[in-house]
Amino acid sequence: MGAGWQWDETLFSGTAAFYRRGRLPYAPGLADVLARVLDLDGRGRLIDLGCGPGTVALSLAGLFGEVVGVDPDAEMLAEAASEAARRKVTGKVRWVRARAEELPAGLGDFTVATLAQSFHWMDRERVAATVRGMLRTDGALVHVSDLKGESRTTDGLPHPPVPHAAIDALVRRYLGPVRRAGRGLLPRGTAAGEAAVLAGAGFAGPYRHVVPGGQAMVRTEDDVVAGVFSMSFSAPHLFGARLALFEADLRRVLREVAPSGRFSVRQPGTEVFVWPRGAD
């Protein structure tokens, strides 16, 4: 993570209620790809680190005998538990409130560990070493993210695209030009270079797989607002007493672009890097 920034418990404060609606899903077929490349058969154990509201953990629950989701945010875990109940998989999932840095916490060993766009918030060297020690000898760590550098045109779709540049400008107007993160700032953004960290911890590979997206999707005004409030850098608590004013301005920007309240987007592709545990 950037020099001078320290994690604090407000990083995603207030975002959990918006997360599932606001974030675009990973590409259809993610579970099928992982089942094939990891030879998953409904047994074994999965640990999902920085699980949030259970997005990945629950989408993969059918591939394992037991799933453990770990996250430091109590509201995220409450959302995850609610969704697990809705999907009727409560009996095979467990939610643990902890930072990844606090592992292994007596959780045992695992067949697969997943990190879905959460590793950059962690003490990566420490977490990589600990997680490798929690994996079975034939286990693997899987890093999941939206496909980098993908061009997703909305040409020919029935509604305008989401005005991301205007939204970003509005957030900066309210919160300042430097990215917010909890109680701190990230002037250079989040850390990159996870491949070097994982290789340094002794993982083998990686093996890259792409799950294609591109499907046309409709997003309502409320979906887009939820997406803004699901982000750490525009979390509701950051606006303080001006939250209602910001939301009113945000909706005004959206209605200027799409008076119908509907926007067209394309489903992002999903990029998967599989890191086998490797020999000691």
Image (cartoon, helix red, strand yellow):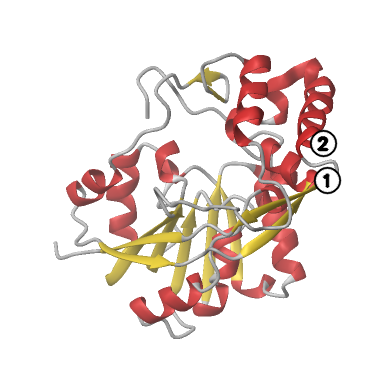
Name the amino acid type tagged 1.
Gly
Residue 261: which numbered mark, if any?
1
Where is residue 14 drawn, in percent x and y?
72, 35
The one of 132 and 16 positioned closer to us in this rendering: 16
Say whether marks 2 and 1 touch (CB < 8 Å): yes
Q: Residues within 10 Å of mark 1 (few under 14, many from 20)?
A: some
Where is residue 162 drawn, in percent x and y?
67, 42
For the point 68% across and 70% down, the residue is 90
For the point 39% across and 65% down, the residue is 210
Residue 167: which numbered mark, if any?
none
**Relative to residue 268, is residue 172 drawn left or right?**
right
Q: Is residue 198 above or below residue 269?
A: above
Query: From where the camera sits, is residue 157 visible?
Result: yes
The one of 100 and 221 positioned closer to us in this rendering: 221
Chain-order first, disc 2 or disc 1: 2
**Relative to residue 66, is residue 245 drawn left or right?**
right
Tag 2 residue: 255
Where is residue 182 drawn, in percent x and y?
57, 25
Helix, strand or loop for disc 1: loop
Q: Is residue 216 above or below residue 262?
A: below
Quadrant (top left, top right, bottom left, bottom right) of the N terminus: top left
Name the amino acid type tagged 2.
Arg
Disc 2 from disc 1: Cα separation: 6 Å
Helix, strand or loop for disc 2: helix
Where is residue 152 drawn, in percent x and y?
51, 53
For the point 63% across and 53% down, the residue is 265
